[in-house]
């Protein structure tokens, strides 16, 4: 588990950052400056190298995840994350997870496996992480999903299904849709910032 960190001011949440395919632990720092520049963060680096592109888990081909690999990496990450947050004295349900694309999918996997350290999650252009697993017992979890109606990489119907799965498990989900593709838009970020401030 490789990461960089920054200590934020008191009374601001700790963010857990997960980049998209081909990114690294520095990719989402610009978003943090826009969303909550006074918050602390742990920004993680994907451990899977796919032809030079870093990811958090393997895939069989674009759009088709290696679910067994995702299960194994999620389980290991949950254990290591628990230890890491304990060391930093972060209380349960006090972290905000923020991820884009592959990173958002990895956060979704953590949620499907009931990661209890996450209070809020911002998933930018995610997909449903599993065909074989549904989440449960997510009451008290708040999720923001940012999706592009014309996203060629993370189809819009995936965002809709993910919203339904999370809501069926008890989470409160806000879906923001932009008439765009896979890129994160300014309107999307502003909507996420407003949602986080509530």
Image: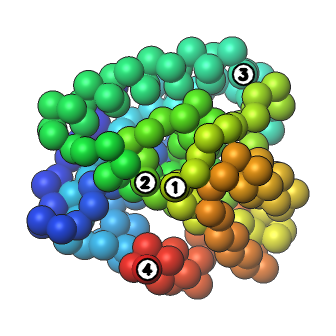
- Residue at mark 3 to residue at mark 4: CA–CA distance: 34 Å
| Residue at the (65%, 70%) spot, across then down | 174
| Residue at the (53%, 54%) spot, across then down | 141
Left-right relation of 20 to 5:
right
Q: Which residue is mark 3?
A: 67
Q: Which residue is mark 2?
A: 119
Q: Which residue is mark 1?
A: 140
For label 4, the SS is loop
The mark nearer the N terminus, 2 or 4, is 2
- Residue at mark 3 to residue at mark 2: CA–CA distance: 25 Å
Position of the N terminus by quadrant: top left
Assess disc 2: are there few (<14), some (14-19) or many (≥20) residues with their C-alpha within 10 Å of its C-alpha: some
- Residue at mark 2 to residue at mark 4: CA–CA distance: 13 Å
Residue 198 numbered tag: 4
Badge 2 vs badge 4, beta-carbon distance below 8 Å: no
The residue mark sitting in front, 1 or 3, is 1
- Residue at mark 1 to residue at mark 2: CA–CA distance: 7 Å
């Amino acid at each position: 588990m490789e990461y960089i960190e920054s200590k934020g001011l008191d009374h601001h949440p700790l963010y857990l950052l997960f980049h998209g395919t081909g990114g690294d632990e520095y990719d989402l720092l610009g978003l943090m400056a826009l969303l909550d520049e006074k918050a602390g963060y742990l920004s993680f680096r994907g451990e899977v190298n796919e032809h030079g592109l870093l990811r958090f888990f393997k895939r069989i081909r674009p759009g088709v995840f290696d679910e067994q690999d995702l299960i194994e990496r999620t389980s290991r990450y949950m254990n290591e994350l628990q230890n890491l947050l304990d060391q930093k004295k972060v209380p349960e349900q006090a972290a905000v997870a923020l991820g884009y694309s592959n990173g958002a999918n990895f956060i979704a996997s953590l949620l499907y496996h009931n990661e209890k350290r996450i209070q809020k999650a911002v998933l930018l252009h995610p997909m449903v992480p599993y065909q074989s697993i549904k989440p449960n017992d997510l009451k008290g979890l708040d999720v923001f999903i940012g999706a592009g109606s014309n996203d060629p990489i993370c189809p819009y119907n995936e965002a809709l299904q993910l919203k339904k799965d999370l809501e069926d498990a008890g989470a409160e989900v806000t879906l923001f849709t932009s008439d765009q593709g896979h890129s994160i838009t300014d309107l999307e970020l502003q909507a996420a910032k407003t949602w986080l401030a509530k």
